[in-house]
Amino acid sequence: MDPQPTRRPGETVFTVMMLLLSIFLLWNAYKISGFSSKSSPGAFPLAATLVMVVAGLVAVFNTLRLPEGPKGFSAFRSQVAPNLVLAFAGLILFYGLALESVGFILTSLAFLFAGMLLLHRQGIGRSLMYSVLSLALVYVTFRLVFKVVLPEGIIPERRILAEIGAVLGPYLGVR
Amino acid sequence: MEALKYFTMAWFDPNLLFLTAIGTFAGIYIGAIPGLSVTMAVSILIGFTFSWEVNSALALIAGIFTGGVYGGSRTAILLNIPGAPAAIATGFDGYPLAKKGEAGNAIGISTVMSVIGGFFGILVLAVGAPIISEFAVRVQPRDYLLLALMGVLLVGALSGESLAKGIWAAAFGMVLGSVGLDPLTVEERFTFGLPQLTNGISAIAVMIGMFGLSEALILLHDLDKKAIKQRVDNIVPKWSDIKKYFGLSMQSSAIGVTVGALPGTGGDIAALLAYDHAKRVTKNPEVPFGQGAKEGIVAPEAANNAAVGGSYIPMLTLGIPGDAVTAVIIGALFIKGLNPGPLMLIEKPHMFWFTVGNLTLANCFLLIFGLTGIKIFAKIVEIPKGVLLPLIVLLSVVGAYSINNSADDVLWMIAFGVFGYFLKLYGYQTGPLILGIILARLIDDNWRRAIISERGDMTAFFLNLVSSPLSAILLGIIVAVLLSKTPLWPKRAQTKARAEGST
């Protein structure tokens, strides 16, 4: 990474937040077993969080020494959290939340389609084609070859696979 | 004679030959796909090779292991996403080289160096196993502790813009790694009363989030920038390059096989140590490190494949896994009724020589597949980002889900992906964080073991740190690395370090 000439928008706030996180974790590490013994379950967390606090302090100090760059909410939005990132992150979150209940195939198809529509911007037809193709590839590789278990959701996928296996099995030599 | 027969067993048996080849080929792709790890693949394989005879299973696993350790470097070079932790160091210089249009060259060098490192590792395994095992027996808990701290410190010091942020990230990783029940006392640590946290946070979920998802989000920033087309012609590296870096590859292989032979440490640490070594010994690199120095590819690639041979040493001679993959292999051997340990070399020498022969064969296949299949492979890079990014997210989700078949791990992965996005944007490196998570357990265990073995006497602990030659050497390295990054180091050296280190 290039040496940084100026402070990034929101950097001071973030560095201070990380310092606060470190202090919070240090306090929690202390609560595990205090300073009871050098080999107690809390000794290692205490040491690690102490290092976090010290390093966090140094990071805040270093950040404050940097010349100020663009600041304010609009700079933060354009450089750190632009609409595209927010929209894509939102899509990912929905995907993760719906995965278990709706199932891998449907959510993945919807996610790929929406994601490609958002990022690739080549129209509905192409996005649909790419998403179906890539989903098929992933499904064959992981579900069928590597036998990775994926959430089934509302499509009775295992039953369909078993039926296909029963029909094709004798021809493919699969028991 | 007997040994030679077992050594070449897999070479002339068409079945074993095929399994080793297919294992190596699949390993390259498994290693290359972020989120799919060799450990995971081998674990799944143990399941469905359960009914196979032991030689076939071992042949397939040797191939996957060898190919997988190498495969991670390809995505590290082409996409700057290490497919496996062992490839983290390869991306430092591999990706800048690819951005300059020399991806083919980088992949070619990484292939040849991996094979050289691999053969070096096998040679040491075959010749020096008894000697190395003797060395490994004498390694004390405090030495493990020092070794792990050294690894964390090195990765913190060599990645990123700020040592403070690197150390912060490493320490945060260690805290994440200690979440859950303490393995010795079953006391809860950082669980905040949440039942989901009692089993800890899956390191793989965090890794996929930090390296897969957050990278995809970062890439959104230059979605509209025309991607530099990664040209991957000239795959076969120049003979002069190989000759030029042969010395460095030998040194790196030596580091790799030593680190690999130490229980608990594998290719990832070996690669990082070798990278740092290369950075120190290369006086005048043609291109500065971090901007596409070939030395920065040679060292980690030779080292991580040398570590494969190294990691078999403690497994076959002591019954202690050299790393996560050999831990899974030990499990498989137990199922087959074989007990790897000090007696195995005496009682079942054929197992040892069969393994050595197998790894040799896998390395030959690695050279063939590594230098031929690249054109198809590199097509991944030519997929437009708008299609690739949703696909990376999809693979990350599959990877995170398949660790424990749990949607919770997917949500952890997403959470750490978003967090990692901010960390990266604000200059906190994720490499040290991951290393911190992986090593937290090792550091914690060995710290307590070291303290308990000194009966809590800190004076004795420190006295031993200085009086034992191995501990003293390791401590010396740690102090030197720390000092070299602080104002206490002589000015001249520091200016030089800054010139190199602003990567």
Image: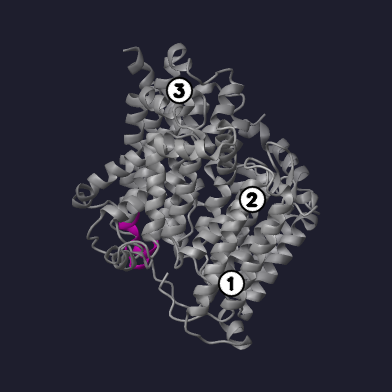
Amino acid beneath label 1: Thr
| Residue A15 numbered mark, or none | 1
Amino acid beneath label 2: Pro
Which residue is at 74% across, 57% downward?
A: A99
Tag 2 secondary structure? helix
Q: Count residues near mark 1 (Cα–Cα under 10 Å), then give few for <14, some for 14-19, many for 20+.
A: many
Residue B364 or residue A55, whichever sits in front: A55
Which residue is at 32% across, 24% downward?
A: B127
Residue A125 sits in which quadrant?
bottom right
What chain does mark 2 sit on?
A: A
Region rendered in magenta: B94-107
| Residue A45 numbered mark, or none | 2
* Residue B102 is a magenta residue: yes
What chain does mark 1 sit on?
A: A
B464 relative position to B186: left or right: left
Image quadrant occupied by the N terminus of chain B: top left
Q: Main secondary structure of the magenta part?
A: helix
Q: Is residue B396 visible?
A: yes
B500 relative position to B385: left or right: left
Q: CA distance from mark 1 to mark 2?
A: 21 Å
Say which residue label 3 marks: B317
